[in-house]
Amino acid sequence: MPRFRWSAVDNSGDVAHGIMEAADRTIVVERLQRQGQIVLRADPADRRAFWVDLLHLALGGRRGLDKAALGDVTRELAIMLAAGQDLDRALRFVVDNTNSARARTILGMVRDKVRAGSSLAAALAAEPQSFSTLYVGLVRAGEAGGSLPATLDRIASLLERERSLSASLRAALVYPALLVAAAIGSIVLLLEYVLPQFVPIFEQAGASLPASTRALMTLGAVIGTAGPWLLLAAIAAGLIGRQLLAQPHYRIKADRLLLHVPVIGRLMRETLAARLTRTLGTLLHNGVPLISALGIARDALGNLAAAAAVDAAALAAKSGAGLARPLAESGLFPARTIHLLQLGEEAAQLAAMALKAAEIHDEQARLMMQRLVALAVPLITIVMGFAVAGIVGALLTAMLSLNDLAG
């Protein structure tokens, strides 16, 4: 019988993993759901099935909804439910009016499960590639509290803010990336195609190239010869690094080191703080208990060092020690985060203060990215200018040498 490797969120908010034998993936999902767990993934455990799934994905197989489609679908569903439509008609409206064939397929399966008697949260949990643990947890809390339309509206706003921040960061990096690509292309063009044109001329004149020109041509030859090997070495190093980072022992060290890198580490801490406080505040605002909310929030961070700090804070919160102090002891989150969370605990307004902290950290992350780009662009321009000037200087030296030979 096939074996499936699964991971799911249990009732306490912790992520559990295991291997289960079953006829197909659907049976695995149903068994875990009967145990009250939210299924994150259930994939074939044997190697051949893994490569089959990977090939299926590469050829355009089934994938989850992207963030843009998920935000649009959530907003439309919230509007329909707020207008008084029942869940089945709201889902049918969204399925019929979405432009994405993938969204129609996934939402159609969700609607079928709901019509068969499943709750919306359970139907969404069966599609972990599209709906995250945070999404499913918020929907479950909204269904339990009878406030599903308002909950979906808040989820849509949450997704839109995350998409806006991601779009801002990507847009800020476009110009520096193009500038670096143009600089590298210009240097390679000069080294590989322009400088070698002087070699036959000097050979015919029976003279040698100037020292600066010879040095640059040697550099170009080394790059041209060793380039493929350097590329292979980089790919091999990337694969080895990926294997090492797949092990929690090395991954947590790398994640912790990244958070302490000057400038970049501070930007990452601001981003993690925004993600943690936004997720935590949204969950608490929808009635999810603190410990369960922390369990879901840790999985949304994407950084094992920060996740370990949240785990320690959750253990401390279980014993009544509060949340802000354990997070402060980790030294991974900005002091502003700790201060605002502490104020929220003292005033019994942790959800509101967490959401306020998320807004502040979002803005700080945007400002830091803008400053980094503002500094990076002239720095790249200066470095490119020096490199091109050095090559052009070598060209001019060669041309002057030709004039001397002619004279």
Image (cartoon, rainbow, N blue to C red):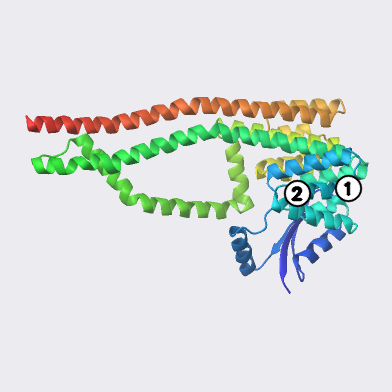
Q: Position of residue 150 (x, y in %)?
A: 86, 37
Amino acid tagged 2: Phe
Mark identifier at residue 131: 2
| Residue topped by disc 1 | 87
Q: Position of residue 75 (x, y in %)?
A: 78, 39
Amino acid tagged 1: Leu
Of 284 and 140, nearer the camera is 140
**For the point 10% across and 30% down, which residue is it?**
404
Residue 257 visible in the current orientation: yes
Within 10 Å of the Cα at label 2, are there few (<14), some (14-19), or many (20+) other Cα atoms? many
**For the point 66% across and 45% down, which residue is it?**
304
Of 53 and 18, nearer the camera is 53
Q: Earlier in the sequence, mark 1 or mark 2?
A: 1
Within 10 Å of the Cα at label 1, are there few (<14), some (14-19), or many (20+) other Cα atoms? some
Relative to 292, say whether 10 is above or below: below
Q: Secondary structure at mark 2?
A: loop
Does 220 sit left or right of 50 as displayed? left
- Quarter of the picture holding the N terminus: bottom right
Of 255 and 82, nearer the camera is 82
